[in-house]
């Protein structure tokens, strides 16, 4: 068996498989990514920026802007359920967001 030269990949033995992911296998989440932090911590709807609100599932830039505008006009939310007063947030979206936000 030949020894690999400097800078080349190690040789595989006959029958040894490459450690490649198939298309159907999920890629592991990047470490230290902002999205990973958003998944593990709740977002305070009284202090969050539009960009932070945009990270919530089902909330895009337009809806995030509506939440911020509503908060600026009406003052801080007193409960997560107050999001249903924001135009465009109905019962289904409120239910999806309820466990992801805090006040």
Image (cartoon, helix red, strand yellow):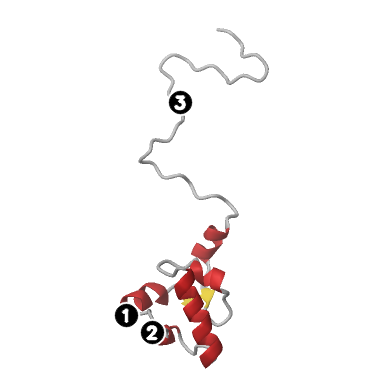
View extreme (left): residue? 92
Labels 2 and 3: the sequence-earlier one: 3
Q: Observer-nearest residue: 69 or 1?
A: 69
- Dividing the picture into quarters, in which one does residue 85 lie? bottom left
Q: CA distance from mark 1 to mark 2?
A: 7 Å
- Dividing the picture into quarters, in which one does residue 84 lie? bottom left
**Residue 95 spot, x, y in % from top left:** 35, 76
Residue holding disc 3: 18
- Quadrant occupied by the N terminus: top right
Q: Observer-nearest residue: 9 or 88?
A: 88
Check contact, mark 1 vs mark 2: CB within 8 A: yes
Left-right relation of 68 to 81: right
Mark 3 secondary-structure assignment = loop
View extreme (bottom): residue? 74
View extreme (right): residue? 6
What residue sits 53% from the left and 59% below the top?
Answer: 35
- Residue 9: give its label: none
Q: CA distance from mark 2 to mark 3?
A: 51 Å
Mark 1 secondary-structure assignment = helix
Labels 1 and 3: the sequence-earlier one: 3
Residue holding disc 1: 91
- Residue 84: give its label: 2
Which of pointers 1 and 3 indicates the residue nearer the eye? 1
Which of pointers 2 and 3 indicates the residue nearer the eye? 2
> What is the tally of numbered marks visible in this picture?
3
Q: CA distance from mark 1 to mark 3?
A: 48 Å
């Amino acid at each position: 068996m030949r020894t690999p030269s400097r800078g080349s990949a190690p040789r595989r033995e006959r029958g040894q498989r490459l450690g490649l992911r198939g298309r159907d296998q999920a890629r592991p989440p990047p470490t230290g990514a902002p999205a990973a932090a958003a998944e593990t911590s709740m977002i305070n709807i009284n202090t969050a920026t539009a960009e932070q609100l945009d990270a919530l599932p089902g909330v895009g830039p337009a809806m995030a802007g509506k939440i911020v505008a509503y908060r600026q006009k009406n003052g801080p939310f007193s409960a997560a359920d107050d999001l249903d007063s924001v135009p465009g947030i109905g019962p289904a979206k409120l239910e999806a967001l309820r466990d992801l936000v805090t006040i």
